[in-house]
Amino acid sequence: MSMGHLVPMVELGKLILRHCHHRFSVTILIAEGPLGTPDVITTFLRHISESIHSIYFHYLPSFSMNPSLHGNRASSFVDFINLNNPNLRQALQTISKTYSVRAFVIDFFGNLALNVASDLGIPTYYFLTGGAVTLSFFLHLPTIHNQTTKSFKDTPTTHLHFPGLPSIPASNLPEPVQDREDPTYNYFVEIGLNLRRSKGIMLNTFECLESPLIKAITDGLCVPDAPTPPVYCVGPLIASTENREGITVNQCISWLDSQPSQSVVFLCFGSGGVFSTAQVREIAIGLEKSGQRFLWVVRNPVSDDNNKHYSVEIKEPDLEALLPEGFLDRNKERGLVVKCWAPQVEVLNHKSVGGFVTHCGWNSVLEAVFAGVPMVAWPLYAEQHMNKAFLVEEMKLAMSMEKSVDGLVSAAEVENKIRALMECEEGRVLRERSRKMKEEAMDVWSDCGSSMIAFTRLAESWVSQ
């Protein structure tokens, strides 16, 4: 369970209650992982429980996993979900004794739950916290699987076509599908097959943001040999900024309040994104040479490998030791470096922020779009390379940060892209396109907006079944 998946699911629950509180109640099932629940998630769940009494959290019993089952991170997670299915079945049976379960909503990490719900006769829907990029990938993966016997890792330069997406090299697909012999690969193919069996698929996106992809999906191009379930674009679902407080929030907002309008570039790479020490130093040098004002969120490096970019470890970095000597002092007038976390939604919506260097996680993309902030795309893991391709080549809301052959982004590249975003014509064009897309995003929840229409259609289907 990660914040990137939990927060949108809670926002979906809030959306249901906001428009259909007289028809539905919302219960969210929480499975605590074998390593426990991070403090940030525990705090978030407690806040939601205390502030929104109509969302109920049902905690599945915790259990220990046999250490011999632990493979890589992805396969361990699949094992955990599979072993949790008996607890899930019992929870659904218990809830069904009190309520008429109109819909069971899962994200792709809960893929194995589809069979449990089907056995109990409960209609199951997927909610993909990514956008239509993710859905095109999953729906079409079984088709590509049947067209080749080779692993993607063995054909890294082969360009693949997912309907509605620019072609991408096999090396840019998510790491869990790179090796055909890895059990996690088969799990991802199964997700694509199970999506086709569901009653419907909800996406945290809106139609005009990803219209070529959504058209390709609904026209059946991703699943050429079977029907595609109904697709409901019910986004953007953005985390609420209410009741957010604390030292870091106050520090960031107070500092931004003192900066000129649209003068600050914000660098943040999500709750899991990490860099090597060498890469952090390159970013610092590039930022300093760019001459731009900046707000930079720095996480502690966990590896010297320039290609290792994910960690759930929460350890505050020693900024004095990590950054170039004298960096903090030299840049204290025009830059703020914060450790581990910043209130991203609040920062992106602040009038002083004029650009965003992002890892292209979908929540971050939506938050930037909704704030009208242009982006520099620096994908790190998961589906982020596919998001980048669509952001840069189709949406044209971002420019791309380019790596060297050793996986390192040079200080010169950081400097050049930040200058281009904040000072040059390319950045001005992106800023204008981002402003227009923000206006589109703000219209989708009006009475005749596309997301409101899609949500109403979805809710009516729950009532009628």
Image (spheres, rainbow, N blue to C red):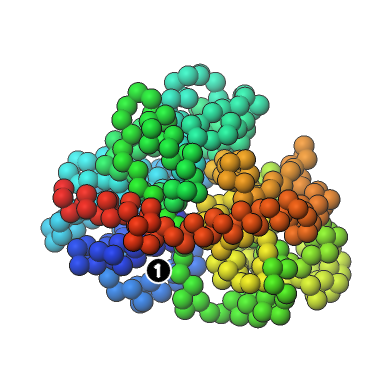
Res 341 quadrant in image: bottom right
Identify the residue under disc 1.
45
Q: Is residue 180 above or below residue 412?
A: above
User: Which residue is pictured at 53% across the width and 79% down the height?
Assistant: 245
Residue 11 placed where, x, y %? 39, 62
In the rendered structure, the answer to whether residue 80 lies left or right of residue 169 reads left
Res 317 quadrant in image: bottom right
Q: Is residue 294 above or below residue 84?
A: below
**Quadrant containing the N terminus in the rendered view:** bottom left
In the rendered structure, the answer to whether residue 353 lies left or right of residue 244 reads right
Residue 260 placed where, x, y %? 73, 74
Res 277 quadrant in image: bottom right
Residue 90 in view of the camera: no
Residue 47 in view of the camera: yes
Residue 38 placed where, x, y %? 49, 64
Q: Is residue 297 above or below residue 260?
A: above
User: Which residue is pictured at 56% across the width and 80% down the height?
Assistant: 246
The type of residue carrying mark 1 is Leu
Q: Is residue 385 above or below residue 295?
A: above
Residue 234 placed where, x, y %? 38, 54
User: Which residue is pictured at 19% across the width and 63% down the height?
Assistant: 23
User: What secondary structure is marked by label 1?
Assistant: helix
Task: Count up the numbered dots.
Answer: 1
Q: Closer to the camera, 295 or 76?
A: 295
Q: Closer to the camera, 450 or 194?
A: 450
Mark 1 nearby-residue class (10 Å; few <14, some 14–19, many ≥20)? some
In the rendered structure, the answer to whether residue 6 lies left or right of residue 318 reads left
Q: Residue furthest left?
A: 97
